[in-house]
Structure formats: C-alpha cells, structure tokens
Amino acid sequence: RNGTMMKIYHHAIHLRTAASLQFIDLTELVNEHVQNTGVQNGMVNVQTKHTTTAIIVNENEPLLMEDMKKTIERLAPRHLQYQHDNFDLRTVNLDPQEKRNGHSHCQALFLSTSATLNIVDGKIQIGKWQRIFFIELDGAREREISVMIMGQ
C-alpha cells in the first residue's frame, strides 16, 4: 500500500428526454466527471434512477442505433395490452398523471439499470467504439442519472 486513501465522489446528471427510444450518449460527460475528481485508478458506476430507462455500453453508429431501437420495440411492442396499463384493476404505485407505459417497463427487463467501468491512469477503460448510453424507453420527461466514482 502506498498510503493513498480511497476517494468516493457522486454526481447527479439531470436531463430532459425528448422521445421514447431515445439514446443519449453520456460518455463525454461521464469522462469529464472522472477527470474532475482526479481519480487515477478505480471504477465509475453510471446508474439510472428510473424503471423505464436503461444504461448500456455499445457503439454509436446510426444504422446500429436504428437496429437497436427496432429490437427493443420487438421485445415489448407499444401496441400490445399490458396489465400494468389497466387502471381499472391496478391499485399499486398509481400517480395522478399516470400514462400507459407497460411496454417501457417490459423493455427495461431486457436492459441494464447501470454500467460499471474501470478507470486506469485517469481514463475510463472503454474500447475504440464503445460509448455509454442512457436510453429513454417511455417518453419525454425529466430524468436523473447517478454517477459514482471510486478509487485513488
């Protein structure tokens, strides 16, 4: 041990999404937060705080993005009927402005709520084509992402 203490930092990213199946590239923002902490070796965890969103690491290539959107839509199509959307039967976790979004909850089942990446020599360890994405599955609204940076 070199006597260096473990540092832990937290940042909240607030954003407003514009549409369902919107992919927002967070890579540069997360990278900026890591660099501002001075952590040289450790980990960064990026976590969504919502049940109808996701965090993934993948390539930012326009045709692939369209393929990913189509794949997610096929997994839980918007047009199907979901029990979650039956407000005559549902009695739990109802909000006065509740909208039908069973499809987006089901889509989220197939995705991740967070991604943890290594930090080495002050840089996030991602591959040449890898990017960190926040995915909106539901629709335009205010969202919050938790970023935890830990290391020395």
Image: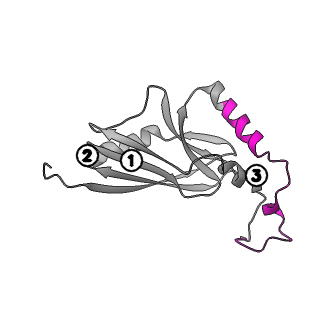
The location of residue 152, given as percent across then percent down, is 24, 48
The magenta span reads: 66-94
The location of residue 32, given as percent across then percent down, is 37, 42
The location of residue 91, given as percent across then percent down, is 77, 74
> As shown in the figure, which amino acid type bears the numbered disc 3?
His
Q: Nearer the viewer, residue 123 or 12?
A: 123
Of mark 3 and mark 2, the one earlier in the sequence is 2
* Mark 2 secondary-structure assignment: loop
Q: Which residue is the site of mark 2?
A: 38
What residue sits 50% from the left and 52% below the top? Answer: 47
Q: Which residue is the site of mark 3?
A: 103
> As shown in the figure, which amino acid type bears the numbered disc 2?
Gly
In this rendering, the label closer to the viewer, 1 or 2 = 1
Q: Residue furthest left?
A: 2
Around disc 2, counting alpha carbons within 10 Å, would you say few (fewer than 14), some (14 to 19), or many (20 or more)? few
> As shown in the figure, which amino acid type bears the numbered disc 1?
Val
* Mark 1 secondary-structure assignment: strand
Q: Which residue is the site of mark 1?
A: 44
* Mark 3 secondary-structure assignment: helix
The location of residue 136, given as percent across then percent down, is 63, 47
Of mark 1 and mark 2, the one earlier in the sequence is 2
What residue sits 86% from the left and 54% below the top? Answer: 81
